[in-house]
Image (spheres, grey):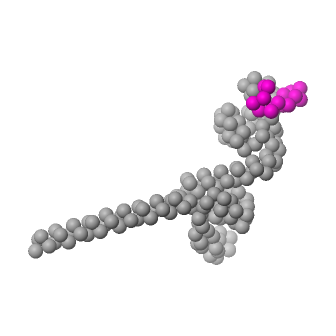
Amino acid sequence: MPPQFTYSTNDLSERFKNIPEDILLTILQKFCRVSLSDHLGQQFVRGGSKAAGEADPNASFKFLKSKENTQLLTLTIIGVVVHLSTQGKSKGYFLERILKKSLADLRSFFKELGLLEEQTKRRDRESGQDVDDVFVYFGYMASQARKKAKAAEAKSEGAAAEQEVEAAEDE
């Protein structure tokens, strides 16, 4: 997406699979500076003297992305993808594809979010060869997995101890 773009709220809603306009504007305000221009060419900063509800239907919104906004959006996307992925782990290759950045560029974002990396291999679709990849995950997910594994181990040890007691009683 370019650093600056202008659309009417209706056009934007259609482009984003008919997400309601007010919700879409709220989301975009988190990652862009939003200004409103009406058919007379007047510009209003969102939340200023003219609110979106009072806007002329022919008005267009102008969205400006700064470097900080882009970085915040990238961090948010990575965090949400990793949090929602299966077992709390996401492949670096997947993040590379959706963000159109190299793994080397993404590593600084991983570090800023406190993500841990685990080296892995994956089969390349084009060449069919194994290539290096990385799983990324939040550290708390690893500690939760260890706790679950310990609980399962303790449960199985308890069940094994019960079986031994029952076997001894039967003798």
Q: Residue at x 89, y 26 (%)?
A: 40
Please tell me which residue lies in front, 128 or 160. 160
Q: Can residue 100 be seen at all in this image of the molecule?
A: yes
Please identify the quadrant where the C terminus is shown.
bottom left
Please name the residue shown 56% across and 59% down the image. 138
Residue 161, above or below 109: below
- The reply to whether the magenta stretch includes residue 46 is yes
The one nearer the camera, 84 or 130, is: 84
Count of picture labels: 0
Using the rendered view, name the quadrant where residue 14 is placed.
top right
Rendered image quadrant of residue 159: bottom left
Above or below for 120 versus 148: below
Query: Within the image, what quadrant is residue 49 found in?
Result: top right
Q: Main secondary structure of the magenta part?
A: loop
Report the span colored magenta: 36-50
Residue 69 is situated, as x and y percent measured from the top left of the image, at 75, 48
Residue at figure coordinates x 60%, y 67% from the top left: 117
Q: Residue furthest left?
A: 171
Say if the magenta span includes residue 40. Answer: yes
Left or right: 86 as drawn, with respect to 26: left
Residue farthest to the bottom, as pictured: 129
Q: Does residue 153 appear left or right of residue 49 in this picture?
A: left
Residue 18, visible in the rendered structure: no
